[in-house]
Amino acid sequence: MSQRTLVLLAHPTTAQSRNNTALADAVRELPNVTVHDLYAEYPDHRIDVAREQQLAEQHDRIVFQFPFYWYSTPALLKQWQDEVLLWGWAYGTEGNALRGKTLQVVTTTGGGADSYRPGGYNRFPMEHLLSPLDQMAHLTGMVLADPLILHSVRETSDEDLALFAKRYRELLEG
Ligand SMILES: Cc1cc2nc3c(=O)[nH]c(=O)nc-3n(C[C@H](O)[C@H](O)[C@H](O)COP(=O)(O)O)c2cc1C
């Protein structure tokens, strides 16, 4: 049986999203997968912390799925971390709620893979830019999976997007 997976989808304008909408659609109907669209759930940005903690507790793997914005997550996913990952729940004394769960980052970028390296116009490797999430996983006892990254979204063909969506689906099925 596959792991119970919570996909925290964070895209502020899904109506204009080509990539993240297609990716969410590719996994939405999978058994054991809950797609939780944060911007749709909280249009006023008032996160229900108890509900989010309960959801996280009910799943074995948490996916952060988001378009890469200013080398980071969109604001509501950062807010989710700030408000949900509390001392005594996520870390600190008896803060073991996430221990042993998997954190999977799935993100899409405008910049090409080649730009994310020293000398490229984005200068830093993705793993460097994603290091706050790496450390968040470490502090909360989560296991960080290799990120799934779709680069160069503006140049990606429909076929390439479908292929990437298939990889994503297979990953969550596994
Ligand atoms: C506010 C904003 C910030 C962005 N910042 C970055 C960035 O730091 N690096 C990058 O490669 N692309 C950046 N992009 C491009 C987005 O990552 C890209 O549009 C998105 O992944 C496309 O996904 P979608 O089709 O689901 O909207 C940015 C786009 C916006 C609107």
Image (cartoon, rainbow, N blue to C red):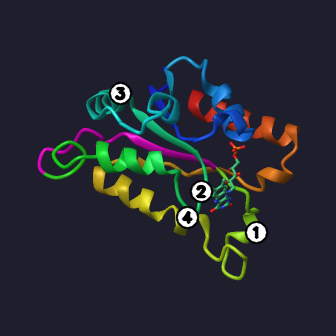
Which amino acid type is shown beneath numbered disc 2?
Answer: Tyr
- Compared to residue 162, the image places residue 146 above or below, namely below
| First-in-chain label (4 vs 3) | 3
Question: Does any atom of ligand 1 lie closer than 8 Å to the CB of label 2?
Answer: yes
Looking at the image, which is closer to me, 170 or 161?
A: 161
Q: CA distance from mark 2 to mark 4?
A: 15 Å
| First-in-chain label (2 vs 1) | 2
Q: Residues within 10 Å of mark 2 (few under 14, many from 20)?
A: some
Q: CA distance from mark 2 to mark 1?
A: 18 Å
Residue 43 rendering spot, x and y as whole percentages? 48, 33
Residue 55 is tagged as 3
User: Which residue is farthest left?
Assistant: 93
Secondary structure of residue under mark 3: helix
Q: Where is mark 4, residue-wise?
A: 127
Secondary structure of residue under mark 2: loop
The answer to whether any part of residue 147 appears in the image is yes
Report whether 53 appears left or right of 88: right
Residue 37 is tagged as none
Q: Where is mark 2, residue-wise?
A: 69
Residue 33 rendering spot, x and y as whole percentages? 51, 24
Report whether 1 appears left or right of 123: left
Q: Which residues are magenta?
A: 93-107
| First-in-chain label (1 vs 3) | 3
Residue 114 is tagged as 1
